[in-house]
Amino acid sequence: MKFPDQPGVYLFKNGDGRVIYVGKAKSLKNRVSSYFKSPQDSHKTKSLISEYKNRFNVVWRDDKQYPYLKVTLNEEWPRLIIARKKENDIAEYFGPYLSISVKETMLLIKRMFPIRWCKESPLKKRAQPCLHYHLKHCWAPCAGKISSDEYLKMIDAIIGILRGDIVYTIKSLTEEMETASKKLNYELAAKIRNRIRNLQKMREKKPDWAPKKRGKTGDTSAWELKNILNLKRTPNRIEAFDVSNIQGEEIVASMVAFVKGEPLKRDYRKFIIRELKEQNDVESIYQCVLRRYKGTLKMDQPDLILVDGGIAQARAAQKALIKAENKAPVIGLAKKQEEIFLPEVNRPIKLKIDNPALLLLMRIRDEAHRFANAFNRQRRRLVK
């Protein structure tokens, strides 16, 4: 059989016709013929066909070695690349990740933060940027299209995401956006706004970046939450409260219920806090928690109560529970740093942003916030 002296892809099949090896070559003629010329290649070919698996495929071997994401901080204009092992150099390494996930993660981040794609080190200056710039995939530091300060801010944001500090990264980007807007740099502000939106979507539905425990998400997260909070039983039913106000005049609140990690919307409740004449989130939490557990709201009792806020809100909820003679445990979740507060402990519990238990709490808290804001808008239309 004759092969063309041209680039292409070739396959090896076993006796049953199953593909056992896939290769590519600049010259099919030279590459395929090399398997049958030298003794070394003959040995390789013999082993290849006898094993009935692609043991010589680089792709197969790579899948057995989990890769890292590397930020090349040793370079003036750092890159985000895939590395097979950690080296003793000035760089940040993250991982290891699944081989497929690491590529998806890198592409996702590069779509949000247009850093350079070229492999050269050090970066060479050019009069005209490459195609990546025109496709808006890169801001072309090689052609002076972005300052070093702005470029390194993107690198800092990328490192923050890879460390799991998505909330902190969003906060930092928001400050950058506001600064750009004040300087009337609306184009830059719009670009940063788009990154913030993408990060918020990522926060709502986190990509599969690394190997995870198998099983139902709600069950796994609740089990981990039980251990973190030292609860007597697994918090399968969690109820969460949030407060919203209409221009500081009329205060409303919401309660949402989640069972095994899923919302139970028939048990959602709305509250109008008429007892207060001015905004007071702590007292509002006390009022709605007291009404929920002392009043006539006949529902299943929760395994855990979550309030939006810090230690003051958590203590207000606990005070209401004591008056209602309800012994359910209560915690607060503060938005700023996503810290967990126990009423009886002054220092918060800090978890990594990708911790399954924290992600569950954030999801429930955000749903309570959404529901409260929806009720807020409904009441605002009635007030007008």
Image (spheres, rainbow, N blue to C red):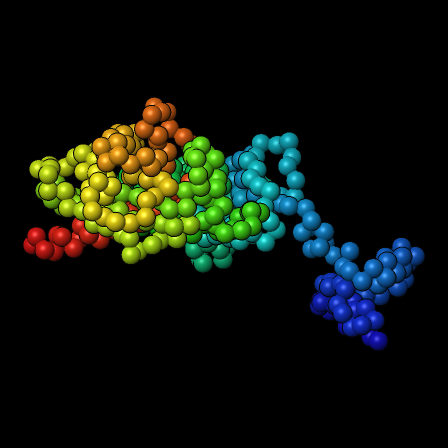
235 vs 267: above or below? above
On the image, the x and y values in percent for residue 101 come to 56, 51
Depth check, front residue: 199 or 76: 199
Q: Is residue 44 above or below residue 75?
A: below
The N terminus sits in image quarter = bottom right
Residue situated furthest right in the rendering: 39
Can the viewer see residue 202? no
Q: Please give left or right for residue 90 compared with residue 149 in the image.
A: right
Residue at x 89%, y 57% (from the top left corner): 43
Quarter-of-image position of residue 350:
top left
Snapshot quadrant of residue 12: bottom right
103 displayed left or right of 84: left
Q: Residue at x 86, y 58 (%)?
A: 47
Q: Give the residue displayed 37% in from the left and 36% down from the top.
A: 338
Image quarter for residue 278? top left
Q: Which quarter of the image is occupied by the C terminus?
A: bottom left
Residue 95 position, x and y percent, is: 57, 41
- Residue 290 appears left or right of 301: left
Q: Is residue 278 above or below residue 347?
A: below
